[in-house]
Image (cartoon, rainbow, N blue to C red):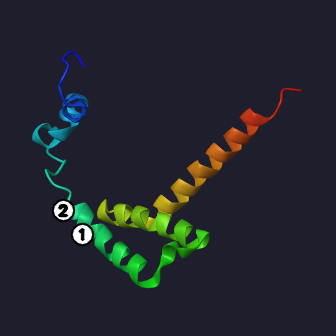
């Protein structure tokens, strides 16, 4: 920060504003970006209700299942073919895992 503020909280706020300001108004210059996240919130609302009712976060399996649900909601919102999007995501993840394993192996 260039200027000193009496309160460290004010200084942190000013720095946060300075760093993030360009992305806050993207909706003004990019017509596809909505000014609010209402549509996203509505898409996730059902998932949150399910999580609260059935307690999916009580074990690791539930956590893994819950992690995929927002992806599915996003793909639906974008009008993507769910089977194709899932296949692509799994293929990319598998390729990253294999690449990481290759990078960890010692050179012969």
* Classed neighbour count for the residue bearing mark 2: other residues with Cα under 10 Å, few (<14), some (14–19), many (≥20): few
Rendered view: 28 above or below 45 = above
Q: Which residue is mark 2?
A: 38
Q: Position of residue 96 (x, y in %)?
A: 62, 44
Residue furthest to the right in view is 108
Label 1 crowd (10 A; few <14 / some 14-19 / many >=20): few
Q: Tell me the element at label 2.
A: helix
For the C terminus, the image quarter is top right
Q: Which residue is mark 1?
A: 42
**At 16% from the left edge and 52% from the top edge, which residue is drawn?**
34
Q: Position of residue 42 (x, y in %)?
A: 24, 69
Say which of 47 and 54 sits in front: 54
**Residue 81 at least partly seen:** no
Residue at 57% x, 49% y is 92
Q: Secondary structure at mark 1?
A: helix
Kindly indicate whether the residue at mark 1 contacts the one at mark 2 (C-beta within 8 angstroms): yes
Identify the residue shown where x is 74% and y is 41%: 101
* Residue 20's disc number: none
Q: Quadrant of the N terminus?
A: top left
The image quadrant that residue 52 belongs to is bottom left
Position of residue 68 measured from the top left corner of the image (x, y, whole percent): 48, 65
Residue 38 on image: x %, y %? 18, 62
Outermost residue on the left side: it is 28
Visible residue check, residue 44: yes
């Amino acid at each position: 920060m260039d200027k000193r503020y009496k309160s460290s909280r004010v200084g942190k706020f000013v720095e946060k504003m300075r760093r993030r300001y360009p992305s806050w108004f993207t909706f003004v210059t990019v017509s596809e970006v909505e000014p609010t996240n209402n549509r996203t919130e509505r898409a996730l609302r059902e998932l949150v209700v399910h999580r609260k009712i059935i307690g999916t976060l009580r074990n690791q399996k539930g956590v893994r299942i819950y992690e995929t649900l927002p992806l599915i909601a996003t793909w639906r919102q974008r009008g993507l073919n769910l089977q194709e999007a899932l296949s692509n995501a799994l293929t990319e993840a598998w390729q990253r895992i294999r690449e990481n394993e290759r990078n960890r192996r010692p050179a012969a």
